[in-house]
Image: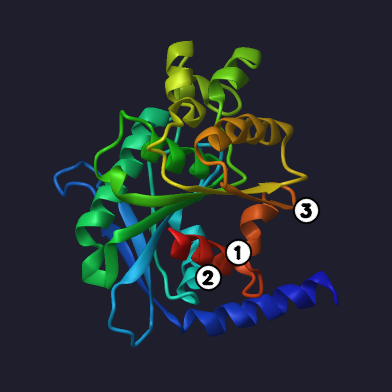
Amino acid sequence: MSAKKILSIGIILMVFTSCATKKFKDISYTEHHDLKPLKLNVFTPRSSKKELKDVIIFIYGGNWNSGNKDMYGFMGRQFGKEDIITVIPNYTLSPNANYDTMAQQVTKAITWTYNTIETYGGNPERIFITGHSAGAHLAALATMSPKYKGETSKIKGIILNDAAGLDMYSYLKENPPKEEPDNYVTTWTTNPKLWKEASPLYHIDTETPPIFTYLGTKTYNSIIEGNRIFREELLKVQPEAKLIKLDKKHVPMIVQYFFPWNNRAKEIKAFMNAN
């Protein structure tokens, strides 16, 4: 079957499955007196079940300087099939923010979800977080670092998808940040102490929520190495932490969720049920 036919079938199925979810768009999750309040989208299953549903927050990637919540509606549709509510927040991108501002904003999105999601049929005691690439870094950092803990302690589990930036300290020591072409001086600063604070690797401890990891075998070498080191440390406190390797490059690790027949949402649902 040609790629064009596969994509056509995917679009048809996407339209069909979108009927199974309801979208609430552009909800402010920061204070209304902010100059430009940050917004998020919520996707809820059109299910007649009365009980409160599990919730997943998805943080998109894009090298910390690109991306938008409205690009990822397919994530809401995928999780909606598994009767999961999905929250997809925007956050301020570099060069208008650094990693610390972004992590603080993810923390605010978690707080909003905990305080508000019951209005949408979600269970505030059953919130998980996931992200792809830079989004996986921010999801992990906001949940694991003592600097951001608050309502983030309510997160029941973390799902990393081809996570970048797990050990920015080691990476930036070998590859000093430059402003061009990726705004890395702005994103990470030139302070090695902050690089370590920005790295989820150095925040692994016995209070780290359960972590479930996806890794592409054809992804960037820096991501493979960062995940290798991170997993070595994680297994010391979570010896049964699950890792699934997929024969994919970096971008297909998120694009796969576009297609209704992939198994990722079911696997994540199983992880959520176990925690």
| Along the line of sight, the residue nearer the viewer: 145 or 173 | 145
Q: What's the residue at 43%, 28% (across, down)?
A: 203
Which residue position holds label 3?
Answer: 247
Q: Which residue is mark 1?
A: 264
Q: Is residue 215 above or below residue 6?
A: above
Do callouts 1 and 2 mark residues in contact (Cβ within 8 Å)? yes
- Which amino acid type corresponds to the residue marked 2 in the rendered image? Gln
Location of the N terminus (image quadrant)? bottom right
Q: SS class of the residue under badge 2?
A: helix
CA gap between label 1 and label 2 equals 9 Å
Task: Tell me what residue is drawn at x 72 percent, y 73 percent.
Answer: 7
Counting other residues with Cα less than 10 Å from the Cα at mark 3, is it few (<14), some (14-19), or many (20 or more)?
Answer: few
What percent of the width, then of the height, locates residue 80? 46, 74
Mark 3, secondary structure of its residue: loop
- Residue under pointer 2: 78
> What residue lies at 66% left-to-right and 62% top-to-bottom?
256
